[in-house]
Every structure is written in structure tokens, then in C-alpha cells.
Image (cartoon, rainbow, N blue to C red):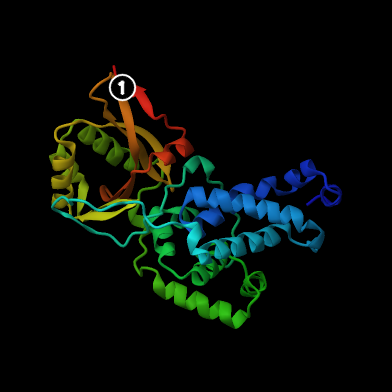
Amino acid sequence: MDESTLKRARAGEADAFRELVESHRRELLVHCYWNLGSLQDAEDVLQEVLLSAWRALDRFDGRSLRAWLYRIATNRCLNYLRDEGRRPESAFVGGSVMDGLVSSDEPWWLEPYPDALIDDVAAGPEARYEARESIALSFVTSLQRLPPQQRAVLVLRDVLGFPAAEVADMLETTRTSVNSALIRARNGLPSEKAPDRVPLPNSAREKEVVDRFVNAFQDGDLDQVVALLTSDAKFTMPPEPLECNGSQAIAEYFRRSLRGQHFKLVPTRANGQPAFGYYLPDPNSPIWRARGVLVLTLAEDQIRTITRFGDRGVLASFGLPRTLART
């Protein structure tokens, strides 16, 4: 950190403040996303974090700017989660539900995180998770099931590798309380961790599975889609609190919902995983209309989870258009 830049920022120079915090902006956004599960909420809270830091810069002790910003960000996230009115209930209104769909306890507010916004987050020596594990959709989903304080402690300790004493200082609590919350958080996460079963991002193995899925799905070949799914595959659809379990049930859902229509898939990446903008043909004009984003979770040479994000508001984060010309 350049002392002259800090001095100018404290004197009220906005450009100097931006220079100070710019290198931390993306990792702070990821941190807010871990805690909130929603990219939109994370972006909103990050703006509050930076405004709060700007206003409190005269109280910064001049030591670790990064740790100070993480302290502000963590507490802003906790405040957001305590204020229940800031996150409205799911807007989904239940109606007739197709056979094979059941109620889901997945966090309805979950949103995908574009790979283009992911930087390698600097983690200390006490971090327990690799970068690709920590941003995976399944991990972010599991975090949302933890109580907010436990979630914050686990992210700071196990994902970012901050020492317990520093986390206690950030949260204005004791080291004993931090260690206790961490144990409970670890016990609250799924015990199975098998990152070795997930093909490396952009590897030949991943590409082969993804290409087979795209070809089968766009051609409406549901038998081939089923062949790619694990027997215990899951299909979830936030913000709708519904899911479909098992390869045959998923295939039947697709048969009923597609009614012979074909999708167009536009590749992207989310949470370090293969993803697609998905489009259906407009019956009244020669265009494809976006319906949302699909994210695939792979297991070896198969697909374990398909997550369909039906809120078309997420498209802009991926640079995906609302419509495409149909040729």
C-alpha cells in the first residue's frame, strides 16, 4: 500500500481512494457472494462496503488494508442477513406441479457467479479449500444453509485462511467463540468432498461431456441426455422452490415441459463450471428468446446436477443477450 496514496485518500481525493481499493474489489465481491449466495445482493452490499470504507478511512490504523476491508465487508453481510426485510420471500407462486417435481430446500435466492468475474483470491496458509472447490455451486449452496455467523467464520478461516485471532478481531468476539463457530460450521457442511471426481475446468474430459450434452439437448435426444446423467442426478430451478430427482424423472420432466421444442444453448461458465444461456424459439418471429442460465455439475464422465436459473436478470452478468436471430 502506497502511503502517499493513503494520505491523499484521507484528504478526500476520490481517485486516490479508488486506487487504494481497486485491487481488492473483485475478491471482496466474491466474499460477499459466499456470504449472500446472490450476485445481485453481493454487488449491492459491496457498494455499501466501499462507501463505508471511504467514510471511515480516517479510522484505518494503516496496517493491513485488505484485512480492514474484509472486516467491513463481513459485518455488512451479517447486517444484511439480519435485516430480513432486505431479502423478500420467493416471488414464486405455486400452481399445478408436474409429476416428478418435489419441493426443494435449495436456497431460492441462489444465483450463478460468472467465471469472468473470478480472480484468484489470496488465501492464507490456514485455508482448507482450493479455489475451484470454494467457488463451486454446491459449496456456495451448502454455505447458505449455515447460520450467518458460522458461514462468515468458515469463509474467513477455511476459505480465506485468516488466523483465528484476526477473525475474532474482525467480528469483535473471542477466539474461543470463533473456534466454536468453525467446528459447528464444518459439521454442518456435507461430509463428502470429492473434487477429484470433477473434471478440471476446460479440460478435454470436461469438454467431451459438455459437447455430448449440448448435442443431445439441442437435438431433443432425451435418451442421450439420460445416458449422461448419474442415476441420482438432481435438477433444481431457483428461484422456484422445486426440484426433480433421478435421471428418469428428469428426462420425463423435460419431455413434458419441452413438448418437442428444441433449445439453443450458448456456452459460458459459472462458478468454475460449464454453463449455458438457454433459448427457446419465439413462435411468432424468427428469433430465439432467452429463458435463463443452465449450470452443469459434473462427476467424472457424467452430469450430477443441472441447475436452471430462470431469472433472466442474470443474463446481463454473463454478457448474454435476451434474444438471438434464428437462421
Q: Using the image as rendered, state which of residue 127 and residue 155 is in the foreground.
A: 155
Residue drawn at the location 25% of the way across and 21% of the way down: 284
The answer to whether residue 299 is seen in the rendering is: no
Residue lying farthest to the bottom in this orientation: 176
Q: Amino acid at mark 1?
A: Ile
Which residue is drawn at the image coordinates 24% and 37% (left, top)?
212
Residue 283, compared with residue 315, is above or below; it is above
- Residue sitting nearer the eye, 162 or 178: 178
**In the rendered view, does 189 fall on the left or right side of 170?**
left
**In the rendered image of this protein, does residue 84 appear above or below residue 214?**
below
Q: Nearer the viewer, residue 282 or 274?
A: 282
Query: Which residue is under mark 1?
Result: 287
Query: Toward the viewer: 15 or 155?
Result: 15
How many neighbours does mark 1 have within 10 angstroms: few (below 14), some (14-19), or many (20 or more)? some
The C terminus lies in quadrant: top left
- Rendered image quadrant of residue 227: top left
Left or right of residue 10, residue 187 in this image: left
Residue 259: image x %, image y %? 14, 35
Q: Position of residue 275 (x, y in %)?
A: 36, 41
Q: Residue at x 40, y 63 (%)?
A: 142
